Image (spheres, grey):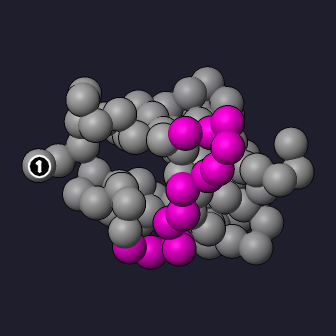
Amino acid sequence: MSYSIEFSKVAIKGIAKLKKSEPQAFKKLVKLIEELKEHPKTGTGHPKPLGQDRVDEWSRKISDKHRLVYAIEEERILVFILTVYGHYEDK
C-alpha cells in the first residue's frame, strides 16, 4: 500500500526556503517524503507521534534546525505534510 502525499501552503513555502537556503536539508527532505509514501510511522529521521492536542500528527528530523511535521489519514491512505521549515517547538 502506498500513501498519497499532500502539502499545506505553509509546507510548500518551507520547501522553497529549504531548497534555496539549505540544499543539504532539502535533499534529506526529498528522501523523507519518498519514505513517507511507504511507511509513515517508521524509518529515517526518528519518526515520533506528537502528543496531546496533535493526535495523528508525526514529526521527523530533517536537521537540528528543521522538522518535517505531518498528519496521517489512514482512512484516505494519505500523508498531509503540515510544515518542513523550523522546529515545531519554536512556533
> Looking at the picture, which amino acid does disc 1 mark?
Met
Q: Could you tell whether 9 is left or right of 34 in the image?
A: right
Say whether residue 36 is left or right of residue 61.
left
**Label total for image:** 1
Neighbour tally class for label 1: few under 14, some 14-19, many 20 plus, Cα within 10 Å: few
Whether residue 16 is visible to the viewer of this picture, yes or no, is no
- The residue at the point 41 percent across, 31 percent down is 6
Q: Position of residue 31 (x, y in %)?
A: 41, 65
Relative to 16, residue 32 above or below:
below
Element carrying mark 1: loop
Q: Looking at the image, which residue is at 72% across and 60% down?
A: 66
Q: Quadrant of residue 39?
A: bottom left
- Residue picked out by circle 1: 1
The answer to whether residue 84 is left or right of residue 71 is right
Q: Nearer the viewer, residue 29 or 58?
A: 58
Q: Main secondary structure of the magenta part?
A: loop
* Residue bounds of the magenta highlight: 43-55
Q: Quadrant of the C terminus?
A: top right
Q: Position of residue 54 (x, y in %)?
A: 62, 39
Image coords of residue 27 (percent x, y): 52, 66
Q: Residue 17 appears at what percent x and percent y?
A: 72, 46
Note whether 71 is above or below 51 in the view shown: above
Q: Is residue 76 above or below residue 4?
A: above
Location of residue 14 by image quarter: top right
**Residue found at the far right of this picture:** 90
Whether 61 is drawn above or below 74: the answer is below
Q: Is residue 37 left or right of residue 24?
A: left
From this viewpoint, is residue 5 visible? yes
Which residue sits at x=67%, y=43%?
52
In the image, 54 versus 14, the foreground residue is 54
* Identity of the residue furthest to the front in this view: 52
